[in-house]
Image: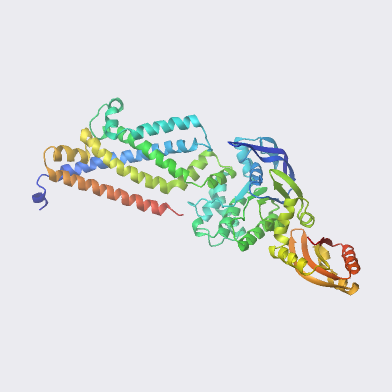
């Protein structure tokens, strides 16, 4: 559905050249929810704007839904853009138009007749759950409602691809979740390909199938969300994964326990999917002469299964502890021994 | 009783002058509104990082606007006499004032239009582009409606300035309340005529301001 080949974008500024996107290759298949994560300035915003021609690559090709977006111009580009819609961090609604009129805007652009517009707008309002707010102006809506209008507007012309530019970054956590649920629902119901950029790992975890991590204009890591969570490779990816798996307190707790218990080992366990349901701790205590102290644990849901982490402290005879760790290794559970610093 | 206090006021004449002033003001306001929006749009669209970015055209329009905005109105009328004669065949009467009124006010209003357009959220224009909108659609359905309150409050200020301009034009033969106040009031030492003409001008200004404020607040849904 989307194919980016050797795309580069170089901006010339007073301070010299900035490589916003540096030789990116990416293929996204139909019906996928693909996430791009990175800190601000990583180039993700430029990358997503290349997908609908708001930015043109300095070098390379961008093909979206059979349109070579990087080269087409004029009416062809405008036609293509009707198949590649976009939602924004700050919603970008027209304040002078009501909810209904905002949703009708892309239909006016596409030249849909008035009667059909009215019908389609009704459907869309139901789809995004805005019944009763049709005649309100954007200023009278909450952030979440505004983004729902944005989504309805983006879906009006039955696009093949939906681009989300930090679509939940201006929303509170609860509203973020409801918007993310709406996006998953749309993806499943309409088979829409969704590309989103974000700086929140939470968003990736919740709805993406695959994720690319960007830093300095390059993709430094790419893979299935579950794999990336389990075995992050790049340093920056580890930091993003920690955002959702290890709250700040854990680090402090671990530090404190390391100094409190110079004996024994602190172990971080990673569970994926089915292994999360094994009675691992029970077996550990029954079969080995060790004490187990549970420090912190968490299970996160992703689109392709659950992922859990558990921090435990093992104490006892050195040999017994080593045997216990060997036992955990044999149980298809990720183990990382956090040694004394 | 009115005649006792204001012995020299010829009400028939006053009404006629008021009609002339309203005529000059309304025609020039409409023309200024259209011309100013066109110039303002050109200034905005050809500016940096915009749809028709073009430094040369932008500079030319900006220079034109600045020149005509800086010429004092009274001098502008005189300078435009040959031009007025060419297109209207005369330089006396209310129609003769129109070219100077429009050319004097449109550049002034164009700058206000430009400011109004700059206040539109760039993201909204980007959103329209991302939906596949043509430039004409962006102008008619995004730029103009989204800046309408600024356009209306700008034309209100301009209309009030134009009432003042018509009075100046009146002094040199364009008719209207300015003409009446100057020729029949001031020059004949009939202070009551001057005062009544001034009051009528004030009333016109207040009404314009009231209407402008009302429309602006009705339009603004932010």
Quadrant where the N terminus of chain A lies?
top right
Residue B135 seen: yes
From the viewer's perspective, tell me whether residue A230 is left or right of residue A115: right
Q: Quadrant of residue A308?
A: bottom right
Residue plotted at (74% across, 63% down): A300
In the rendered image, the quadrant that contains the C terminus of chain A is bottom right
Residue B18 locus on image (x, y percent): 22, 43
Relative depth, front residue between A130 and A36: A36
Residue in the foreground of this view, choosing between A319 and A300: A319
> Residue B59 location in percent, x, y?
45, 31
The spot of residue A18 in percent (x, y) is 64, 38
Q: Position of residue A58 (x, y in %)?
A: 66, 35
From what the image shows, is residue B19 above or below residue A138? above
Frontmost residue, A221 versus B123: A221
Q: Residue at x 58, y 59 (%)?
A: A144
From where the camera sits, is residue A210 visible?
no
To which quarter of the image does residue A250 belong? bottom right
Q: Residue at x 63, y 49 (%)?
A: A40
Which residue is found at the position 28% from the left and 50% from the top? B206
Whether residue A321 sits left or right of residue A1 in the image: it is right
Q: Name the residue nearer the viewer: A281 or B65.
A: A281
């Amino acid at each position: 559905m989307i194919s980016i080949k050797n795309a580069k974008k170089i901006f010339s500024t007073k301070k010299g050249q900035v490589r916003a996107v540096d030789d990116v290759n990416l293929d996204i298949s139909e019906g996928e929810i693909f996430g791009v994560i990175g800190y601000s300035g990583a180039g993700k915003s430029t990358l997503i704007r290349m997908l609908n021609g708001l930015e043109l690559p300095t070098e390379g090709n961008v093909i979206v839904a059979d349109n070579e977006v990087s080269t087409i111009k004029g009416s062809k580009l405008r036609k293509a853009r009707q198949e590649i819609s976009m939602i924004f961090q700050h919603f970008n609604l027209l304040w002078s138009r009501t909810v209904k009129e905002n949703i009708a805007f892309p239909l006016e652009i596409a030249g849909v007749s008035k009667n059909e517009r009215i019908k389609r707008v009704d459907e869309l309002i139901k789809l995004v759950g805005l019944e009763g707010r049709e005649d309100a102006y954007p200023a009278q809506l909450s952030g979440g409602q505004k983004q729902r209008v944005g989504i309805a507007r983006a879906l009006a012309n039955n696009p093949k691809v939906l681009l989300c530019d930090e679509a939940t970054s201006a929303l509170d956590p609860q509203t973020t979740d409801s918007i993310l649920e709406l996006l998953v629902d749309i993806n499943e119901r309409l088979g829409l390909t969704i590309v989103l950029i974000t700086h929140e790992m939470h968003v990736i975890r919740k709805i993406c199938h695959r994720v690319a991590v960007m830093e300095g204009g390059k993709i430094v890591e790419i893979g299935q969300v579950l794999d990336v969570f389990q075995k992050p490779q790049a340093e920056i990816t580890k930091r993003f994964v920690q955002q959702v798996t290890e709250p700040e307190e854990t680090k402090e707790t671990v530090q404190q326990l390391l100094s409190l218990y110079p004996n024994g080992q602190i172990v971080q366990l990673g569970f994926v999917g089915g292994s999360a349901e094994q009675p691992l701790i029970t077996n550990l205590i029954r079969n080995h002469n060790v004490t187990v102290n549970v420090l912190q644990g968490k299970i996160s849901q992703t689109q392709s299964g659950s992922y859990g982490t558990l921090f435990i402290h093992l104490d006892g005879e050195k040999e017994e502890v080593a045997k216990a760790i060997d036992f955990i290794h044999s149980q298809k559970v990720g183990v990382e021994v956090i040694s004394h610093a | 009783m009115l005649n006792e206090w204001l012995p020299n006021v010829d009400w028939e004449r006053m009404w006629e002058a008021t009609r002339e002033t309203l005529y000059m003001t309304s025609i020039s306001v409409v023309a200024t509104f259209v011309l100013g929006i066109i110039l303002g749009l050109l200034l905005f669209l050809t500016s940096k990082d915009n749809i028709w970015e073009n430094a040369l055209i932008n500079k030319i329009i900006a220079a034109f606007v600045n020149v005509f905005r800086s010429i004092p109105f009274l001098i502008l009328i005189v300078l435009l006499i040959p031009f007025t004669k060419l297109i209207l065949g005369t330089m006396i009467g209310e129609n003769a004032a129109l070219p100077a009124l429009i050319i004097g006010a449109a550049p002034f209003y164009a700058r206000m239009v430009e400011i109004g357009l700059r206040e539109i959220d760039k993201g909204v224009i980007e959103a329209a582009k991302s939906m596949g909108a043509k430039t004409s659609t962006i102008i008619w359905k995004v730029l103009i409606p989204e800046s309408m309150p600024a356009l209306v409050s700008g034309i209100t200020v301009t209309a009030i300035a134009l009432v003042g301009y018509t009075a100046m034009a009146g002094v040199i033969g364009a008719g209207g309340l300015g003409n009446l106040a100057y020729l029949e009031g001031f020059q004949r030492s009939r202070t009551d005529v001057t005062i009544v003409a001034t009051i009528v001008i004030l009333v016109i200004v207040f009404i314009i301001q009231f209407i402008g404020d009302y429309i602006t607040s009705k339009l603004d849904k932010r």
